[in-house]
Image (cartoon, rainbow, N blue to C red):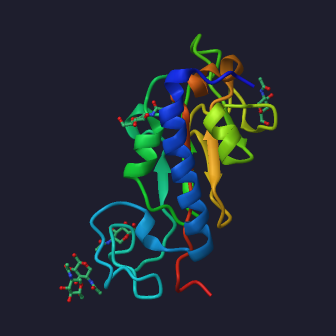
């Protein structure tokens, strides 16, 4: 595992705080954790949802290209992207797009990490490969957020360098659509 420099300590503490918030959210499935400016009356978890993802109540899963037009590349801040695209819902689809080694010298991949700590430290020792360097080609690699659980996505290239220094990491906690029973 990579050593953690002194300068990282402050952000580490912030992330730990965020992590413990996440645990609370997991337990309660409260909608208010995600995004700002919520009206507690209208967004109470068991009330009818009314936000950009469900304005017309179609209940359709959303399909999002990770990074938007930036796709999946070194240096883009995916934590910010994920934050701006909250909330995610169970059954939403994330699409990772990146060129295969035949088209570029810059290789990428997608791994899932098992927990917040490995995510924070970009520890790939227990990472699970979900898309290799060629699978982001064309329409991209599609990943369905099947379960109500946190997902820790990282790029696994260069022994974790893309995760650590390249910001190719983000996590999502998809929410349940309350009327799906
Ligand atoms: C929140 O929504 C409720 C119900 O629509 C409304 O009565 C209330 O004024 C809203 N509060 C704020 C701060 O917007
Ligand atoms: C949901 O929000 C939109 C835009 O803010 C509003 O026009 C609509 O009336 C709201 N629907 C419900 C059911 O509250
Ligand atoms: C309803 O949602 C669907 C799926 O997101 C979208 O394609 C459609 O344009 C929306 N319709 C309206 C009236 O907002
Ligand atoms: C990547 O995965 C695809 C689909 O499973 C497979 O066909 C391909 O051989 C793999 N490529 C590499 C470089 O491992
Ligand atoms: C992404 O940007 C935010 C806001 O500027 C910053 O707090 C965060 O540390 C950045 N993430 C990474 C992995 O650099
Ligand atoms: Cu990468």
Q: Residue at x 57, y 13 (%)?
A: 104
Closer-to-camera residue (71/149): 149
Q: Quadrant of residue 87?
A: bottom left
Residue 97 appears left or right of 52: right
Residue 7 visible to the viewer:
yes
Q: Residue furthest right?
A: 126
Q: Quadrant of residue 80?
A: top left
Judge whether 99 appears above or below 177 on screen.
Answer: above
Closer-to-camera residue (157/63): 157
Residue 24, percent from left and from top: 57, 67
Q: Residue at x 40, y 83 (%)?
A: 44
Q: Residue at x 42, y 50 (%)?
A: 83
Figure disc tally: 0
Judge whether 65 appears above or below 26 on screen.
Answer: above
Judge whether 15 appears above or below 54 on screen.
Answer: above
Quarter of the image with the N terminus in it = top right
Quarter of the image with the C terminus in it = bottom right
Closer-to-camera residue (64/76): 76
Residue 36 appears left or right of 111: left
Judge whether 156 appears above or below 57 on screen.
Answer: above
Residue 90 visible to the viewer:
no
Residue 38, percent from left and from top: 30, 71
Locate ligand 1 by image quadrant: bottom left
Residue 16, percent from left and from top: 57, 47
Q: Residue furthest top?
A: 105
Closer-to-camera residue (164/97): 164
Residue 85, percent from left and from top: 40, 53
Q: Residue at x 49, y 74 (%)?
A: 30
């Amino acid at each position: 595992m990579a050593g953690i420099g002194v300068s990282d300590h402050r952000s580490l503490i912030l992330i730990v705080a965020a992590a413990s918030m996440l645990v609370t959210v997991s337990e309660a499935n409260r909608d208010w954790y995600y995004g700002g400016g919520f009206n507690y009356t209208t967004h109470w978890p068991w009330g009818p949802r009314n936000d950009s993802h469900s304005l017309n109540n179609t209940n359709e899963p959303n399909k999002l290209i990770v990074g938007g037009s930036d796709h999946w590349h070194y240096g883009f801040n995916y934590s910010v992207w994920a934050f701006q695209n909250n909330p995610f819902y169970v059954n939403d689809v994330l699409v990772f797009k990146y060129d295969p080694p035949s088209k570029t010298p810059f290789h990428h991949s997608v791994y899932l990490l098992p927990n917040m700590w490995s995510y924070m430290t970009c520890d790939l020792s227990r990472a699970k490969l979900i898309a290799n360097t060629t699978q982001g080609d064309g329409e991209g690699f599609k990943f369905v957020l099947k379960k109500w659980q946190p997902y820790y996505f990282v790029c696994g290239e260069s022994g974790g360098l893309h995760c650590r220094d390249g910001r190719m990491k983000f996590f999502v906690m998809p929410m349940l659509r309350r009327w799906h029973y």
